[in-house]
């Protein structure tokens, strides 16, 4: 499973290569003329993460599948999702904008500007109260998210030994698209394309198809297993590979090959713009969050004929039965909008003020931290009301989430809430300093205002960074590029700390001849490499995951370290090689395999398992008699 950001990087390199070498000028021109459609196609199976909602065959209803992971966040982030309440994004943006204005005025000692800002500054206490109100809901939302991870996101094929695997007609659309008739579906898209937009989309999809067939095996070595068996760790790892791919592509030629401060952070890359509606009014993210949270239909923002192409290809390739949901053009249109919204939340620059703000102490020095700051950051209580909560315990009364409540994540979110309370204590000093200067009182002191403002801004910056770390750990946000250069990460707040392998451990492929790790227990440990646990439980028969090691460049675009094989992904391997017999070899990089496929399209596209389940070189397969056996008896076929 390659993330959207990685696929955008692959698409760009593929298009540059085909254009420079005169390969398939028809496809190249279509992608040049309709880059948004090409980028939408490059999402591949990820587009179908959002292809259904809870009312089969109709628009509206609560998001299901991967969409249900984001529903709780809409309630926290969106304006008027809860009527009359501003969301976390707009509150923090208004707050940081106000603090930036006050800083400029305080640095310039501009009394006139301060008087003009007085009324706006007097609204800061309400902004802080709004922030506290929103953050008070986050621990409960975090527990809801963790319940979704265990239940809604679990693939239907993720069954324990001896249990029946449900027929694929009722699988989540994303899993079915990645597991069944993958070559046939890609072929139908290209055959049905009759406009530049449709051709660009189909070309993007072929790029995704080839990239997943080539590079998913490498990503699985980082996961230690497959999406079917370790579904959330796969997505978590993909976020880190995404951050690496975007950062590396943003670096200037000749700059450091390893992540450093010159790499751009994907959290502020605004990648939602790459799939913005091009034939309808621009999306309103706040409106989309309200509609999804309330179960209302989304506006039809994408070309109907493109959505019909996708739906018709799906109808031609995949059967439906009573009780299963057909993939309709309306479903596809909504899915496009939901992916746009996800990318807006993930890469729209939210909660990044502290990365670019001037947080240096004033010229006269920061002075002693105020009491409210000392109390809040010490975790000792200090006689004040701010204390850091203890590690939360599972809620035994709720068996659906009790076994998966992640204490570390809840503690961090709890810390965000608790520390936010300190801002309410710091506000009076800051507002009082502004009022004294504006009123011309004898004790008015610009220097003290600058000091109070420094500590308030520093505390808010720390708060936003803590929120970022919690969202990264929860799998809903990408890490910063510089954090990919760490071997270990540690999150600590008060007496609670949480350590996990990070950096290259979450981006670099490795040779894995013992693979895949057996079914995840859906516990609290998606951050842990299942292969490093003792003893590691393996799903037999063991297979080969990948045959070379290195950073994402090795499996995404570096031909020197991973040359194109004789057939790329254009021809299937004998099914027996998928069990490790004959030791299959990596077909080449994602980029090279995609270029090769576009240049030399075969008569029949192989039906590769795009999740590389159960290892390198595996085509689509199913369990014998659809019952999970140990060892697994895999039968070739879509």
Image (cartoon, rainbow, N blue to C red):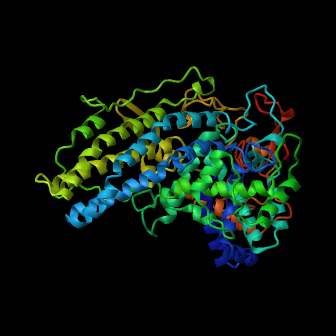
**Image x and y of residue 98, in percent:** 35, 57
Please tell me how many numbered marks the rendered image carries.
Answer: 0
Residue 332 spot, x, y in % from top left: 75, 56
Where is residue 359, by image quadrant?
bottom left
Q: Residue furthest left?
A: 442
Residue at x 62%, y 42% (from the top left corner): 69
- Find residue 510 and report its horizontal and vertical position in percent: 57, 46
> Does any portion of residue 364 appear in the rendered image?
no
Relative to the observer, which residue lies in front, 295 or 499?
295
Residue at x-position 73% and y-position 58%: 333
Which residue occupies 81% across, 69% down?
A: 193
Quadrant of residue 383 within the rendered picture: top left
Q: Seen in the image, is 500 located left or right of residue 559?
A: left
- Which is nearer the eye, 29 or 617? 29
Left or right: where does residue 254 sit relative to residue 323?
Answer: left
Q: Position of residue 357 (x, y in %)?
A: 34, 58
Residue found at x 46% / y 61%: 264
Tell me, yes or no, if residue 49 can be seen here: yes
The one nearer the camera, 360 or 510, is: 360
């Amino acid at each position: 499973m390659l993330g959207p950001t990685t696929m955008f990087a692959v698409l760009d390199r593929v298009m540059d290569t085909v254009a420079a070498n005169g390969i398939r000028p028809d496809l190249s021109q279509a992608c040049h003329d309709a880059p948004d459609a090409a980028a939408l196609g490059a999402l591949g199976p990820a587009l179908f993460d959002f292809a259904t909602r809870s009312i089969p065959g109709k628009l509206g209803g609560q998001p299901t599948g991967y969409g249900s992971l984001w529903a709780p966040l809409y309630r926290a982030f969106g304006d008027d999702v809860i009527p009359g309440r501003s969301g976390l994004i707009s509150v923090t943006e208004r707050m940081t904008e106000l603090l930036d204005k006050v800083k400029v005025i305080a640095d310039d000692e501009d009394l006139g500007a301060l008087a003009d800002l007085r009324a706006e500054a007097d609204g800061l206490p309400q902004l802080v109260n709004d922030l506290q109100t929103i953050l008070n809901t986050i621990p409960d939302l975090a527990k809801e998210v963790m319940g979704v991870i265990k239940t809604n996101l679990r693939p239907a094929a993720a069954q324990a030994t001896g249990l029946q695997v449900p027929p694929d007609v009722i699988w989540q659309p994303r899993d079915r698209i990645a597991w069944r008739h993958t070559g046939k579906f890609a072929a139908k898209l290209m055959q049905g394309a009759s406009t530049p937009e449709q051709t660009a989309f189909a070309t993007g999809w072929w790029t995704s198809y080839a990239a997943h067939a080539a590079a998913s095996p490498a990503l699985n070595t980082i996961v230690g297993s497959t999406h079917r068996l370790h579904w959330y760790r796969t997505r978590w790892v993909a976020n880190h590979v995404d951050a690496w791919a975007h950062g590396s592509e943003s670096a200037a030629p000749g700059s450091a090959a390893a992540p450093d401060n010159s790499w751009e952070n994907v959290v502020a890359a605004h990648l939602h713009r790459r799939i913005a509606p091009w034939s309808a009014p621009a999306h309103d993210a706040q409106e989309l969050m309200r509609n999804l949270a309330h179960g209302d239909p989304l506006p039809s923002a994408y070309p109907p004929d493109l959505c019909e192409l996708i739906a018709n290809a799906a109808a031609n390739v995949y059967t439906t039965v009573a009780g299963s949901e057909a993939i309709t053009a309306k479903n596809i249109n909504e899915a496009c909008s939901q992916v746009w919204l996800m990318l807006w939340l993930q890469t729209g620059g939210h909660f990044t003020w502290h990365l670019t703000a001037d947080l240096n102490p004033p010229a006269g020095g920061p002075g002693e931290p105020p009491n409210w700051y000392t109390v809040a950051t010490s975790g000792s209580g200090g006689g004040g009301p701010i204390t850091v909560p203890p590690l939360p315990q599972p809620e035994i009364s709720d068996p659906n989430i009790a076994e998966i409540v992640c204490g570390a994540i809840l503690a961090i979110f709890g810390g965000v809430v608790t520390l936010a309370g300190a801002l309410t204590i710091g506000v009076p000093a800051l507002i009082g300093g502004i009022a004294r200067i504006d009123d011309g009182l004898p004790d008015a002191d610009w220097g003290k205002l600058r000091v109070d403002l420094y500590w308030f801004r520093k505390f808010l910056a720390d708060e936003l960074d803590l929120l970022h770390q919690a969202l990264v750990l929860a799998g809903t946000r990408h890490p910063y590029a510089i954090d990919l250069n760490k071997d270990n990460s540690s999150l600590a707040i008060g007496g609670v700390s949480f350590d996990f392998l990070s950096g290259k451990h979450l981006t670099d492929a490795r040779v894995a001849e013992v693979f895949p790790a057996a079914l995840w227990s859906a516990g609290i440990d998606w951050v842990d490499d299942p292969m490093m646990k003792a003893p590691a439980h393996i799903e037999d028969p063991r297979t080969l995951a990948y045959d070379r090691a290195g950073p994402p460049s090795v499996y995404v675009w570096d031909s020197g370290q991973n040359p194109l094989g004789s057939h790329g992904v254009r021809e299937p391997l004998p099914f027996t090689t998928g069990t490790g017999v004959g030791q299959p070899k990596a077909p080449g990089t994602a980029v090279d395999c995609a270029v090769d496929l576009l240049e030399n399209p075969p008569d029949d596209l192989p039906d590769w398992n795009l999740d590389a389940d159960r290892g390198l070189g595996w085509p689509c397969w199913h369990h014998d008699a659809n019952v999970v056996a140990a060892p697994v008896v895999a039968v070739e076929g879509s």
